[in-house]
Amino acid sequence: MPASIFLATATAAALAGCPAPEAPIVDVTSEVSGVEIVRRTPREMEGLYDVAATMARRVHPVGLTHGDTHLDSTYTFLAVPTKNGQVCLWPKRIQVRVETASIVSVSKDVGRNTCEWHAVLEHEMRHVEADRMTAWRATFQIRDKMREAAIGYGPFNRADMADAKLKLIATLEASLKVASDQMYAARDKAQDAVDSEEEYARVASRCTFPDVFVVNGATARGALLKNSLPSATFVRSD
């Protein structure tokens, strides 16, 4: 008998010739690493951020946040024999970890414990918090998506077990990709929202540095030379 995908409900399973499955356990968690603050030379900062590509005048980046948010998934399956000696397979446990790590780079020409130092860190930590909040909110959406994707496979011959698992994993990973794309889109919006006009005004009045301003996060993402996504950055003009 050829195998077929069936929805993980008692009615659908019975129609497919499989025992009624139990609902899988779907466990989605958000894990946060500590923030790493790195002091870099002005030349190293410019190597992280291609300001020349987006700014008409020469500027020096003094603060930049790199957020790394990624998903790690693990699946456990339950195989149950049918009356005719074949097997039905469905997810028993779905585990997804949303892991967030942040690196805040601060130029060495910003003195420690100065007003500018605190202003840079205050702003960059807003970007760190935006990443963390986005990841936490995404756990609920991912949980719903994975519950919807918890389909079964069968009945099939036991010799086809490996192929059946691959098909189920591909289905689950496709749903996880949709959820992760939504999370990354929400992340971009949250990062850009940090760089509001109000934030610009707050930063401009924070210290006696009228030439310190913020480059919008979307501009920063387009100008970055590396693969990781930055938040906005503080820059200081010559």
Image: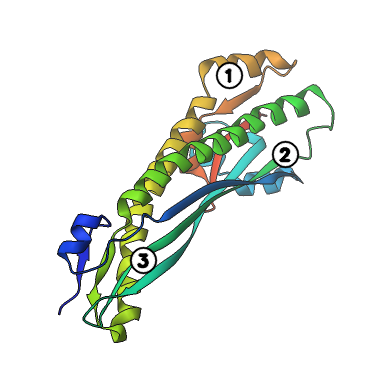
Label located before the other in sequence (3 or 2)? 2
- Seen from the viewer's position, the closer of residues 62 and 229 is 229
- Image quadrant where one finds the N terminus: bottom left
x 44%, y 52%: residue: 26
Query: Residue 118 or 95: which is nearer the viewer?
Result: 95
- Residue in the image at 79% along x and 40% along y: 108
- The total of numbered circles placed on residues is 3
Residue type for callout 1: Glu
Tag 3 secondary structure: helix
Q: What x and y, as percent, mark residue 114?
A: 83, 25
Callouts 1 and 2 close, C-beta under 8 Å: no
Element at label 1: helix
Q: Which residue is mark 3?
A: 169
Q: Give the residue displayed 65% in from the left and 19% down from the top.
A: 203
In three-dimensional space, the C-alpha distance between marks 3 and 1, rounded to whole angstroms, equals 44 Å
**In this figure, which residue is indicated by the disc labeled 2?**
106
Q: Residues within 10 Å of mark 2 (few under 14, many from 20)?
A: many
| Local SS, label 2 | strand
Q: Is residue 195 above or below residue 76?
A: above
At a point 61% along the width and 24% down the height, the residue shown is 213
Choose between 27 and 52: the one closer to the eye.
27
Residue matched to label 1: 199
